[in-house]
Image (cartoon, rainbow, N blue to C red):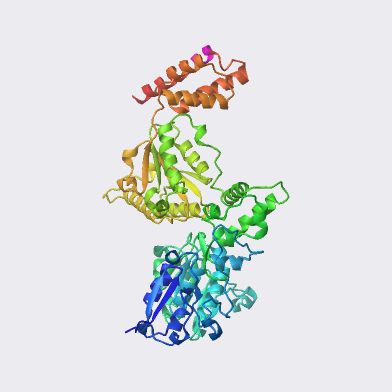
Amino acid sequence: MTDGRQIEIVAWSEADRARLYGASRTATVAEVLRDGMFLLRQPFDRRLADLRVGDVDLVVRMPVDVGLDAPLYRAVPAPRSAEATGTAVSDTGSQLPPPPPRGAVPSFPEQISDRTAIGLAYAEEVETIASFIRQGLSVLVSCEKLVVKQLGPLIAERSSREAVVLDTPPEDSDPGAALMMPRSQRQRQLGRLRELLRELKDGRFLIVPHADLLAGGPDNQLNAEAREVVELLYGNAEHVVLAFADPSIGLPEVLASRFTTRIGLSGSPRTVPDPIDGRPRLLGEVLVTRAERDLFLGYEPSEFHKHVAGLNPIRVRQAMQYAYYQHRGRERPTGLDLFKTIRGFKAQMSASFEVPNVSFDDIGGYHQVKKEIEDALRIMQGGTTDPEDELLQSDLIPRGFIFHGPPGTGKTLFAKAIANYLNASIMVVSGPEVTDKYVGEGERKIRELFAEARRNAPSVIVFDEFDAIAGRRTDRDDGGSRAGNAMVAQLLTELDGFRENVPFLVVGTTNQLNLIDPALLRPSRFRGIRVGEPDRTARRAIIEVHARRFKIDLTPQLIDLMVDATEHRSGDDIQSLLRDAYVGQRLHGHPANDPYVIGELVGRMNRAVKEHRESRL
């Protein structure tokens, strides 16, 4: 029985909503509301604070259900002087600032520390992890090492429990050192772990900042130290442990299973709760300082996230500081300059990624192929005005493209043009480079490639000769078939684990589409696009593009002759034709636009093709 006593609560995440609806019916209303980041639709009624949850009607809504202009109130007992005012109150009873009017210029912080950046961007995740710790449950967090130093103390503060951190004792405190038996850092940490678990008291919990370095590796290759860590943690299962592991290293499953729950943190969210009133604000408002905003003319906070989505909050701040010092003192840099600089910053962070300079205009012909690609990319970038498209975005765009067709038709060029269109960095990987003779290495490489792509988002990862790692799975029991099946399974896992707010695409190129596993060719995963031999119109456009590139002045009549002479030739063949004409002019003085010179080069190309065909017979 609720006796009509209703409390309307606004939760900022589905996890908070689920926690509210799953709260114990014997817990008090005040206890439940203090367990998360919640706001109320009405001022808090102090008479309800000590009632049991089962005696009231909790109605939980999400921010999208209440609108930006709705008044919201702190989910804490308000001072009685404020109860009758009908105004939103903070923890101290002061009136909260109203939501900014639509179109108003948002406020930007004067400065942002790493701790503040992590606390703002991961506020919901920190609260979720802290709630598990409060309930006496162990948590394994998968995240980049750069954020661990800030995350541990933040979670400890929110958990209201005293934390004990596993550190590395200095060598001079090691008893073995006096006996001329110095131990490694890992061995010293193991000794410290054993000591802390033995002394850990009720109400405290243990933080293991580098569980991966202590016991990382696959289950079937546990070293002596990893086995001891497993034994210690399972032998002290009653203790609450918060452990961190980098996703690129990972933990053995036998050790990861010791933890009640596992939570992954990667990249940065599009919106974060405002530190003052909890309302959602754009990342480009909260993690950008006023000075940085003022420097870049026309800076749009709404455009910020897609350029930094794959970076953790500390990297976001590093990218902004780098861009600020790069452009400070220059004449009115723009928001576009900022985003180009951020893209270059991300490319410098990884030796594998590069900033492409190929545009669709650099690819002659193929108008239908370009239109099909650009339509998909427009939806991906939110290029339509229908608000329903944004809700359906994950269903409207594929995970990536597979370009298939004869060699030399420009499949990799299209991938680079896509990256340029998205203002993204690009990594081109040859399929055979991923394969490995050791069991599990191919899957590990694929995992690392996708993790790197997410960190550098927006990014495009290109698998050249895609059929080498995505071939049809078989039921044969030989080692090669098992390894190939495992790589396809890992690809499927990575594709299905896409985060919608981390913009990156996967592109595969192949000459043999029939070899690709059918599961990868589903429309929701890869969209197949054929890039065939160029037709007459496309050949003309390709000739004109490369003539401009090599600065060769061709007459319309000569272009017509070249179009006829290059039938059944690829764009790569046409490029080599004009390249050879340019080289002949520079080295030997032969006019590059002389019909006889072009005719000789065409004849040489045809003879080479004929000899190649005869050699294959």
Q: Which residue of the protein is positioned furthest toward the front in this rendering?
A: 85
Q: Which residue of the protein is positioned furthest toward the left in this rendering?
A: 475
- Image position of 607 (left or right of 284): left
Percent position (x, y) of residue 451?
A: 48, 55
Q: Which residue of the protein is positioned furthest toward the top in this rendering?
A: 596
Magenta residues, dominant SS class: helix
Depth order, front residue of 347/84 = 84
Residue at x-position 37% and y-position 86%: 26
**How many circles with numbers are drawn on the protein?**
0
In this rendering, the answer to whether 315 lies above or below 58 is above
Quadrant position of the N terminus in the picture: bottom left
Residue 406 visible in the snapshot? yes
Residue at x-position 36% and y-position 26%: 616
Q: Residue 593 magenta-drawn? A: no
Depth order, front residue of 157/198 = 157
In this rendering, the answer to whether 361 lies above or below 127 is above
Residue 25 visible in the snapshot? no
Percent position (x, y) of residue 23?
A: 38, 79
Percent position (x, y) of residue 441?
A: 42, 53
Q: Image quarter for residue 373?
A: top left
In this rendering, the answer to whether 253 lies above or below 175 is above
Quadrant position of the C terminus in the picture: top left
The part of the chain drawn in magenta is 595-599
Depth order, front residue of 139/60 = 60
Percent position (x, y) of residue 276?
A: 57, 71
In this rendering, the answer to whether 445 lies above or below 89 is above
